[in-house]
Image (spheres, rainbow, N blue to C red):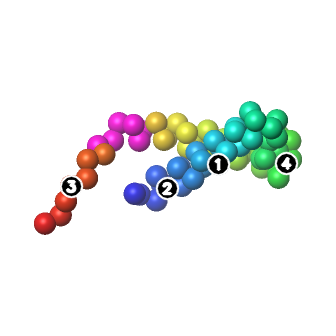
Amino acid sequence: MRGLDVISLILVIIGAINWGLIGFFNFDLVATLFGNMTAFSRVIYSLVGIAGLYAISFLGRDREVHEER
């Protein structure tokens, strides 16, 4: 996996956990840690959104693993 893929996947997982917390418990972890819509929390939300858009490219990639001989 490339570095950008790993970073994107980590951000997508963070976003999914945050949305799960919002849905199940009405608890926004990002807002709790960094403030409600502060500049830094907006950056976090933006990075997670961009990572989600980038993660769409994972669907179109060739997943076949080639054995090296």
Q: Which mark is residue 6?
A: 2
Image location (x, y in percent) of residue 31: 82, 44
Circles 2 and 1, Cβ within 8 Å, touching? The answer is: no
Which quadrant holds residue 18?
top right
Distance (Cα) linking label 4 and label 1 = 14 Å
What's the residue type where badge 3 is placed? Answer: His
Distance (Cα) linking label 4 and label 3 = 45 Å
Between 51 and 25, which is closer to the camera in this rendering?
25
Image location (x, y in percent) of residue 13: 59, 47
What's the residue type where badge 1 is placed? Answer: Ile
Distance (Cα) linking label 2 and label 4 = 25 Å
Number of numbered callouts drawn: 4
Q: Which mark is residue 14?
A: 1
Task: Give the mark, 3 or 2, whose residue is nearer the N terminus.
Answer: 2
Which quadrant holds residue 68?
bottom left
The range drawn in magenta is 57-62
Residue shown at the point (46%, 52%) measured from the top left:
5
Distance (Cα) linking label 3 and label 2 = 20 Å
Instruction: Name the mark nearer the viewer: 3 or 2.
Output: 3
Image location (x, y in percent) of residue 3: 46, 59
Quadrant holding the N terminus: bottom left
In the picture of the structure, the residue carrying the numbered disc 4 is 32
Could you classify mark 2 by the number of other residues whose Cα lies within 10 Å: few (under 14), some (14-19), or many (20 or more)? Answer: few
Task: Give the mark, 4 or 1, whose residue is nearer the N terminus.
Answer: 1
Q: Label 2's element?
A: helix
Task: Give the mark, 4 or 3, whose residue is nearer the N terminus.
Answer: 4
Which quadrant holds residue 52?
top right
Task: Give the mark, 3 or 1, whose residue is nearer the N terminus.
Answer: 1
Q: Which mark is residue 66?
A: 3
Residue shown at the point (82%, 52%) measured from the top left:
33
